[in-house]
């Protein structure tokens, strides 16, 4: 089945459900990676391993450490930075990385404008429904390493047309 037919990825979490709209026209390889990982159940049972209030939520690492995960293309794939997309407000979906062209499975959702990330992280979608859940996730208590003090889990992630 053609991944591109999926316009949304639904995330059912321990704190509620949200939907991600894909930006296929701007980041097709990244969208394909995200949709296929969700379709295969890769994100199921992943923790939100990093939450920084007023900044972002990060997940997508099946080890829960923030150091794991891989893409459908192998360990990492190249950035798809687009000059028309900006980290301009809450709900933007972007790839986590450890430098240029190191995208894997981890992603983050910003909670506020983070313009300093422009040109450094691939933006590939946005939250289209469930922003109240995202806001609630952003308020979870964390330790000094930005790790939630309670487990916040993705119960199920799946693509939808």
Image (cartoon, helix red, strand yellow):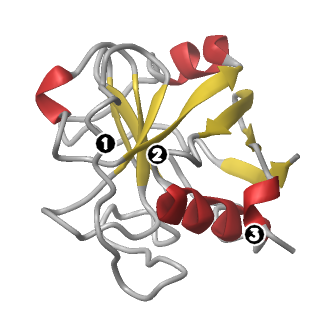
Checking the image for residue 127, the label placed there is: none
For the residues marked 3 and 1, what is the alpha-carbon distance in whole angstroms?
A: 28 Å
Checking the image for residue 82, the label placed there is: 1
Q: Position of residue 57 (x, y in %)?
A: 41, 34
Label 3 Cα neighbours within 10 Å, binned few <14 / some 14-19 / many ≥20 = some
- Say if mark 3 contacts mark 1, CB within 8 Å: no
Is label 3 in a helix, a strand or a loop? loop
For the residues marked 2 and 3, what is the alpha-carbon distance in whole angstroms?
A: 24 Å
| Left or right: residue 117 compared with residue 95 | left
For the residues marked 1 and 2, what is the alpha-carbon distance in whole angstroms?
A: 6 Å
Residue 16, quarter of the rendered image: top right
Looking at the image, tell me whether mark 2 or mark 3 is earlier in sequence order.
Answer: 2
Query: Between residues 10 and 50, which one lies in front from this camera angle?
Result: 10
| Left or right: residue 35 compared with residue 67 | right
Q: Residue at x 80, y 70 (%)?
A: 2
Query: Between residues 56 and 147, which one lies in front from this camera angle?
Result: 56
Label 1 Cα neighbours within 10 Å, binned few <14 / some 14-19 / many ≥20 = some
Checking the image for residue 26, the label placed there is: 2
Figure quadrant of the N terminus: bottom right
Residue 133, quarter of the rendered image: top right
- Say if mark 1 contacts mark 2, CB within 8 Å: yes
Is label 1 in a helix, a strand or a loop? loop
Looking at the image, tell me whether mark 3 or mark 1 is earlier in sequence order.
Answer: 3
Q: Which residue is mark 3?
A: 41
Asked if 45 appears above or below 142 in the picture, the reply is: below
């Amino acid at each position: 089945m053609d991944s591109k037919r999926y316009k949304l990825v639904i995330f059912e979490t321990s704190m509620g459900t949200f939907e991600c709209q894909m930006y296929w026209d701007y980041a097709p390889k990244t969208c394909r990676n995200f949709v296929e990982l969700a379709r295969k159940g890769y994100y199921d049972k992943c923790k939100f391993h990093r939450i920084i209030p007023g900044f972002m939520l990060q997940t997508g690492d099946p080890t829960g450490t923030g150091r794991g995960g891989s893409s459908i293309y192998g360990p990492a794939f190249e950035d798809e930075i687009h000059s028309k997309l900006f980290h301009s407000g809450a709900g933007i979906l972007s790839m986590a990385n450890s430098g240029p062209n190191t995208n894997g499975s981890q992603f983050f959702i910003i909670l506020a404008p983070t313009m300093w990330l422009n040109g450094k992280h691939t933006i590939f979608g946005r939250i289209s429904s469930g922003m109240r859940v995202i806001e609630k996730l952003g308020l979870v208590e964390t330790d000094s390493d930005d790790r939630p003090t309670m487990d916040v889990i993705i119960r199920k992630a799946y693509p939808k047309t």
